Amino acid sequence: MVPNPAKKTAQADLRKARLALSQAEAAIGIALEESKRTSLVKFKTQNAELTAITEKARSEVDRLGQEVHDIPTRVPLNSIRPEAVLMDEERKLVTHAIRMSTYKAESALARMIAPICPMDEARALLREAFNCAGDLQIVDGALEIRIDPLSAPRRTSVLVSLCEQLTSSKTCYPETNLVMRFSVKDRPGIS
């Protein structure tokens, strides 16, 4: 069972109808205030229009409220997306393990640059760095990883610091004897 998207849409329509009702009721209130300064005949004609609009809005709110009430909150997944299937338990566990490992790796990298920038900014910087293009080359028995500069010079300087820390760890690429060396490409005009 999954949340019903039809209910969410109906609830949004109900919110809009309630807003229209409150605006109509506010208009009646304003008309009542102004009626103290105008004639009674003029107020009755204005009030008839406003009352009709308000009653129409109220009936729409009632209708949509009943419609929202009648729509089930949760429905079977196959009724919404027939092609979707639930993952097997093993596959789901592997997926969660990968996500947790990725989060832990990102957290470790964020802690490495925490002295330079705040943790929330560090995570944003890392997301940008993960999406950057770069070059991989094997040079003198080492795997050179050259990353393109980031969007701002300040962010690029933080990335340079991270690359220096990662290179100083002398980590080998898995199942090889290639030591990884990280660097950031030079951007013309930026020192």
Image: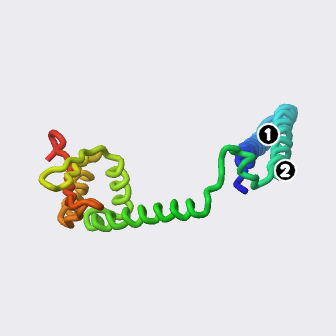
- Residue at the (65%, 47%) spot, across then down: 84
**Looking at the figure, which quarter contains the N terminus?**
bottom right
* Element class at badge 1: helix
Residue, far left: 140
Q: Indicate the amino acid at tag 2.
A: Asp
Q: Residue 21: image x %, image y %? A: 77, 44
Q: Is residue 100 among the parts visible in the rendering?
A: yes
Q: How far apart are marks 1 and 2 (CA)?
A: 41 Å
Q: In this view, does 93 lie to the left or right of 132?
A: right
8 is higher (above) or lower (below) than 90: above
- Residue at the (75%, 52%) spot, across then down: 76
* Element class at badge 2: helix
Which is closer to the viewer, label 1 or label 2?
Answer: 2
Q: Nearer the viewer, residue 86 or 27?
A: 86
- Residue at the (47%, 61%) spot, across then down: 99
178 is higher (above) or lower (below) than 56: below
Q: Nearer the viewer, residue 119 or 79?
A: 79
110 is higher (above) or lower (below) than 154: below
In which quarter of the view is residue 119 placed? bottom left
Mark nearer the N terminus (1 vs 2):
1
Q: Residue 125: image x %, image y %? A: 33, 54
Mark 1 lies on residue: 35
Q: Indicate the amino acid at tag 1.
A: Ser
**Which label is found at residue 70?**
2
Q: In this view, does 81 lie to the left or right of 114?
A: right
Q: Residue 26: image x %, image y %? A: 74, 45
Q: Nearer the viewer, residue 138 or 121?
A: 138
Q: In this view, does 162 lie to the left or right of 28?
A: left
Question: Around disc 1, counting alpha carbons within 10 Å, would you say few (fewer than 14), some (14 to 19), or many (20 or more)?
Answer: some
